[in-house]
Amino acid sequence: EKGGYEHFMLKEIFEQPRSILDSMRGRMIAENNHLMMGGIREYENKFANAQRILIVACGTSWHAGLVAEYLIEDLARIPVEVEYASEFRYRNPIVNENDIVIAISQSGETADTLAAIELAKSKGATIFGVCNVVGSSIARATDAGAYTHAGPEIGVASTKAFTAQVTVLTLIAMMIGSKRGAIETSKLYELIAELEQIPAKVEQTLKLDKQIEEISAIYKDVTNFLYLGRGYNFPVALEGALKLKEISYIHAEGYPAAEMKHGPIALIDEHMPVVVIATKDSSYEKIVSNIQEVKARKGKVIAIVTEGDTTIPAMADHVIEIPETSEHLMPLLSVVPLQLLSYHIAVMRGCNVDQPRNLAKSVTVE
Ligand code: F6R
C-alpha cells in the first residue's frame, strides 16, 4: 500500500507531480487560457466585490493560507487577513456579511477551524472551504468550496495536501484577479503557462532526493535549525521548520529573513544550520545579504537556489538547485526539498516519520 516506498510520507512527497495535477484537473485548460472552478461560479461576483477576505486555518494549512494572502493581494488586489483559527474564534473578531472567509483544512475535521467557521457564519459571512477530505465536517459546514483532490494523505506530516492547497488557492487568486480586472491578461496567461509546467518541475525537483539525503546525514545530530525566506518563500520557511520539528523532534524556527537581525541572529554560531530559501525573485539581492550575515557569524548555510545561480554557491555551505518559475508559484517547488530534508533527517534519527509522537492526523480536540 506504500507503493514500494518505505514510508507513507515519502510516497506522498513523491506523489506531488500527480496530486498537483489532480488539484488543477478540469479547472485550468492552459491551451486556451481558460480557468473555471465549479465551487466558485455561484460566488464569483461576491468574491470579485469582496471588501476583504479572511483566511482561517491551523498548522500547515495556515501556511498555505499565508501563501494565499500574498497571491490574492498581489493578483486580485483584495485585502486579506490570515488567522490561526484558534485565535480568531476566541478573540471577538470583527466579521460581517460582506466578508468572505476561506477555511483551509486537509482533514476537514480540525475542531478550531470548524469553530471559527461557525463563528463567522453566525456573523453572516460567506464561508468558502478548501478541504481534501470529501464530505468532511468542514466541507459540509461551508457555503461553497473547492476540494484539493490530493488523494488520501496518511503520513501525519502534511506534504501533498499543502501543495494541492497552494495550487487551488493560486487558481482562485488568478480567477478573482481576472474577474476584477486586477491582473493584466498577459501576466495571467504567463502564470497559467507556468502553472501548467509545475508538475514536471516538481518531478525534476524530486531528483534531488539523493543529494538532500547526503546533506541530511551531515546535520542529523544537531539540536537546532533556522529557516529563512522572504516574500512567497517566507511561509515556506515556516513550513520547512514545522516539518522538521514534527517528525525529527529537532527544534527549528522559521523566520522572515529580514527579521533575523531583530533577534534570532544572536543564535547564530558555527553550530547553527540555517536553511535559506533564496530563489531568484524580487527579494533576491536582499536575501543574498542575509546569507552574508549568517556566514559572517560562521553559521552553516543550506541554500535553496534557482538553477544556474552563481552568486550563492560561492557563499553557501550547500546549495540545492531547483527549477526556475514565477515567484508566485515558487512555494510549490521550494517546499519540496524541505519536505525531503525533514524526512531523511527523521529517518536517520530513527524516528517514526508516519506517526510522530504526540501528534494525530486530525486534531479534533480544542
Ligand atoms: C502539519 C500538520 C498539522 C496540520 C493541522 C491542520 O504537518 O499536519 O499542522 O496541518 O493540524 O490540519 P488540517 O489541515 O487537517 O485542518
Image (cartoon, rainbow, N blue to C red):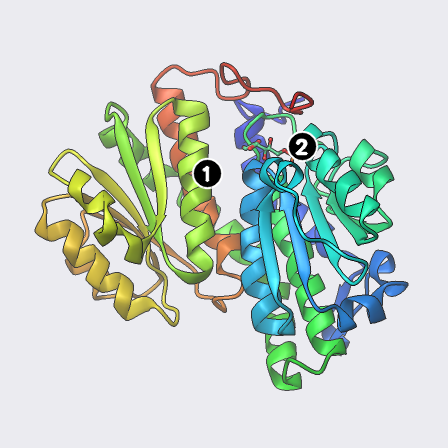
Q: Which residue is mark 2?
A: 112
* Crowd class of label 1 (few under 14; some 14 to 19; many from 20; radius 10 Å): many
The answer to whether any part of residue 151 appears in the image is no
Q: Which mark is residue 359?
A: none
| 1 and 2 marks in contact (CB < 8 Å) | no
| Residue in the picture at 54% in, 56% down | 67
Tell me how far mark 1 sits from mark 2, CA to CA: 25 Å
Q: Point out residue 258 in the picture as x, y percentages from the top left corner.
A: 29, 58
Above or below — where is 89 with respect to 325?
above
Q: Point out residue 243 in the picture as x, y percentages from the top left corner.
A: 45, 34
In-front residue for pair 123/1: 123
Quarter of image, res 242: top left
Quadrant location, the N terminus: top right
* Crowd class of label 2 (few under 14; some 14 to 19; many from 20; radius 10 Å): many
In-front residue for pair 116/166: 116
Q: Amino acid at mark 1?
A: Gln
For the view shown, which residue lies furthest in the right direction? 42
Above or below — where is 358 with respect to 26?
above
| Residue in the picture at 67% in, 25% down | 362
- Looking at the rendering, the quadrant in which ligand 1 lies is top right
Residue 195 in the figure: left or right of residue 172: left
Quarter of image, res 272: top left
**Of marks 1 and 2, the one in the foreground:** 2
Q: Which residue is mark 1?
A: 339
Q: Amino acid at mark 2?
A: Asp
Which is nearer the N-term, disc 1 or disc 2?
A: 2
Find out if the beta carbon at label 2 lies less than 8 Å from the nearest ligand 1 atom: no
| Residue in the picture at 55% in, 19% down | 359
Quarter of image, res 188: bottom right
Q: Point out residue 364 in the picture as x, y percentages from the top left corner.
A: 69, 23
